[in-house]
Amino acid sequence: MNLGQLNDAQRGLFKTDCTITCIFSLVHQQFREAVKDCKLPDSDDTYLLRWLIVGKMLRDAMEWRHQHKINTLLDDFTPPEVLAKYFSAGYTGVDKLNSSLLITRFGAMDLKGMLLSAKKRDYLMTVVEVVERGIRAAQNNPTKFKRSPDSIFQMTVIFDMAGFSMRHITFKPVAVETTLQLLQISESKYPELLRCVFVINAPKIFAILYSMMKPFMHEKTKNKVQIYSHDSSIWKAALWRKSIPTSYPFATGEP
């Protein structure tokens, strides 16, 4: 793993004179041995290091993957028609650090309508399918989606909240249960997958939903979230400065 991806506390887990080779050796010899009975979706050392660094429970995550058949999700799962047509999220390339760039038009989606028309599990699995699709793309083309061979794969996510209203908040499964469940999945099943999160076009009412989520968010996740209002000149500049390549339309002010 590229040590540039670690913060000071994470670097402290290793001896200061330890090289990349030493870290990989530690992963391979100790951690890999400890979890050799787990059915891992990725055999790469950087995948194991992702779990070693954050101190999460790998076995719990592998059990979750087995229970929900995540390893075969891309081949076996077909979202209901309403989710296939109206769930608005997609990849648009990579950011400045070769992290996959995912944009979700959260505010424009009729989540209440989708959850009334489809099972909550199907909605959750639709989101997971999007994540797994990004991971598979990185596995198939690591040169494009990783800044260096020893880096872990990460994502930059943009939530466009234009259109967000009380309708999103007052429908309980969307505002509380489902959103918090997705947060839990992100933090415990995909540790260190998020590089950063940009929330753009956020109306004042968005603060209500975010206040519901913050008590359940890990501090590291909170530190990755940046929220911007409807002033596009501000969030476009921030995206260009912190993440988006200059060729991206948001950065140049194009439609």
Image (cartoon, rainbow, N blue to C red):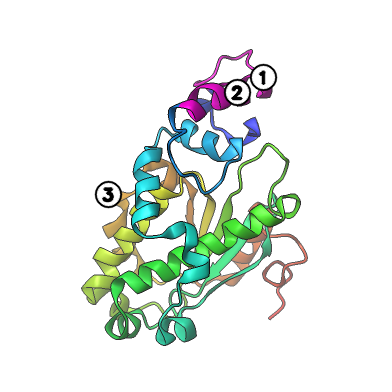
Q: Does the magenta stretch include residue 23?
A: yes
- Residue type at mark 1? Thr
Q: Determine the main secondary structure of the stretch shown in magenta.
A: helix
Side of 89 relative to 204 (left or right): right
Spatial separation of the CA atoms under disc 3 and disc 2: 33 Å
Instruction: Point out the frontmost of discs 3 and 1.
Output: 1
Spatial separation of the CA atoms under disc 2 and disc 1: 6 Å
In the picture, the disc for residue 87 is none
Q: Is residue 19 above or below residue 200?
A: above
User: Going 54% across and 32% down the picture, which residue do you hit?
Assistant: 7
User: Going 49% across and 32% down the picture, which residue do you hit?
Assistant: 53
- Could you classify mark 3 by the number of other residues whose Cα lies within 10 Å: few (under 14), some (14-19), or many (20 or more)? few
- Residue type at mark 3? Pro
Looking at the image, do the residues carrying marks 2 and 1 touch, with CB atoms under 8 Å apart? yes
In which quadrant will I find the C terminus? bottom right
In which quadrant will I find the N terminus? top right
- Report the number of numbered marks: 3
Q: Is mark 2 on a helix, strand or loop?
A: helix
Looking at the image, do the residues carrying marks 3 and 1 touch, with CB atoms under 8 Å apart? no
In the picture, the disc for residue 23 is 2
Chain part drawn in magenta: 12-33
User: Going 43% across and 78% down the picture, which residue do you hit?
Assistant: 79
Instruction: Point out the frontmost of discs 3 and 2.
Output: 2
Q: What element carries label 3?
A: helix
> Which residue position is annotated with label 3?
215
Residue 159 appearing in the image: no
> Which residue position is annotated with label 1?
19
Spatial separation of the CA atoms under disc 3 and disc 1: 37 Å
Of mark 3 and mark 1, the one earlier in the sequence is 1
Side of 41 relative to 152 (left or right): left
